[in-house]
Image (cartoon, rainbow, N blue to C red):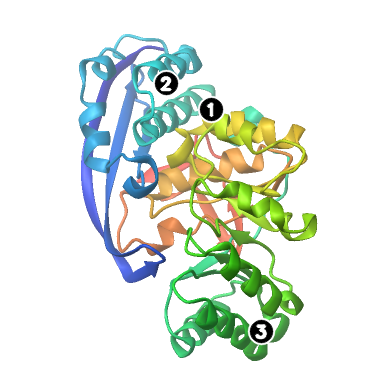
Amino acid sequence: MKIIAVRAYLKKMALTKPYTIAYNTYSDVALAFFEIELANGTIGYGSGSPAEDVVGETAEQTVANLQTEFVQALVGRDIRQFQQIIFESSIHFPHLPGTLAAIDIALHDAFGKFLGISVANFYGQKVPPLPTSVTIGIKDVQETLQEAAGYKALGFRVLKVKTGLDVATDIERIIRLYETFGNSFTIRVDANQGYSLKDLQKFITATNKYKLELIEQPLKVGSENELLSLSAADRSLLTGDESLTNAKAALQFAHINKPFGIYNIKLMKCGGIVGAKEIATIANNAGIDLFWGCNDESIISITAALHVAYSCSNTKYIDLDGSLDLAEDLVRGGFEIIDGYMHINHQPGFGLTIL
């Protein structure tokens, strides 16, 4: 089945509410969208939402890349060669994961629709539906508790709390969450590179009895060796995020004395499903669990991440709430959240419906 058209465009979308992490505050997001149309009228949808602070690419650059002659030359190619096209794209667009992700996701969606099966079924679903965490940005204690109460009322039971500006306040927020909600929530923490090693040690000691599920990217990129001074038990809870942008980094941190016991995979860091599977394979062979994350993203790329996450046997955690932050989107469907658990619909491709 031949590709007969490709289209790329940019949409700027408001968030339902602003949120703050250790190094920025966001109130809206620019998303790149990509369509691949087949000769039978089938359209595969892709999206790119790279974080410039992490990978050095903007959504505007993503759209410009998707409008180049290289991408336009996909017209006439056979969708059955989708993996070869992804390989060629990775050579042509090195270090541009937002661009690669948009191409990769659209090709997977079109190919799954061509076959009449979901992408998860194509790769084989290895794990059951998991609960996603929902994210509370950096805010004061009372605002944190209020937002947590709202998530509890909606049926969510896993929180990811952003930290990293002030360790004393971070500790107080975690303690108050447990005092207020008891075992109603499982709590994860994401410091977004905001801690020093001394801060991290203080945080771990002060919250030790509260059974945090994991601590994501506590130190700045390049400081990973400092983490080796922590106990193996403490390192097993640490999750590499900004440090882990591709398979090369995954291999680097998979040695015997691992700084991270968990790898965070984002399609917008590693360039899509093919890049994600490479990291997942390295992690599986090193005995490292997978934690699937996201930026503020369309349902398109969130669903793609969910499909590949469920196709990896070492997937243990998902944090795929990025589309919930958008005040609007271009598609619906893909997945359903029931009592906080994310279920894919197993329709062809990613099971998306354009609005």
Residue 24 spot, x, y in % from top left? 33, 63
Query: Looking at this view, is 1 or 230 the one in front?
Result: 230
Residue 192 seen in the figure? yes
Q: Which mark lies nearer to you, 1 or 3? A: 3
Q: Which residue is mark 1?
A: 274
Image height of 244 relative to 251, above or below: below
Tell me where residue 247 sits by quadrant: top right
Residue 153 position (above or below residue 299): below
* Mark 3–mark 2 distance (CA, rounded to whole Å): 45 Å
Q: Are marks 2 and 1 in contact (CB under 8 Å)?
A: yes
- The picture places residue 146, in percent across and down from the top left corner, at 48, 87
Q: Amino acid at mark 2?
A: Ser
Q: Earlier in the sequence, mark 2 or mark 1?
A: 2
Quick one: label 1, few (<14), some, or many (20+) residues within 10 Å? Answer: many
Label 1 sits on what residue type?
Val
The amino acid beneath tag 3 is Tyr
Q: Residue drawn at (29%, 39%), measured in percent from left and top? A: 33
Residue depicted at 59% across the width and 60% down the height: 132
Which one is earlier in the sequence, the residue at label 3 or at label 2? 2
Q: Disc 2 or disc 1, which is closer to the eye?
A: 2
Question: Is 341 or 314 nearer to us in this picture?
Answer: 314
Q: Which residue is mark 2?
A: 90
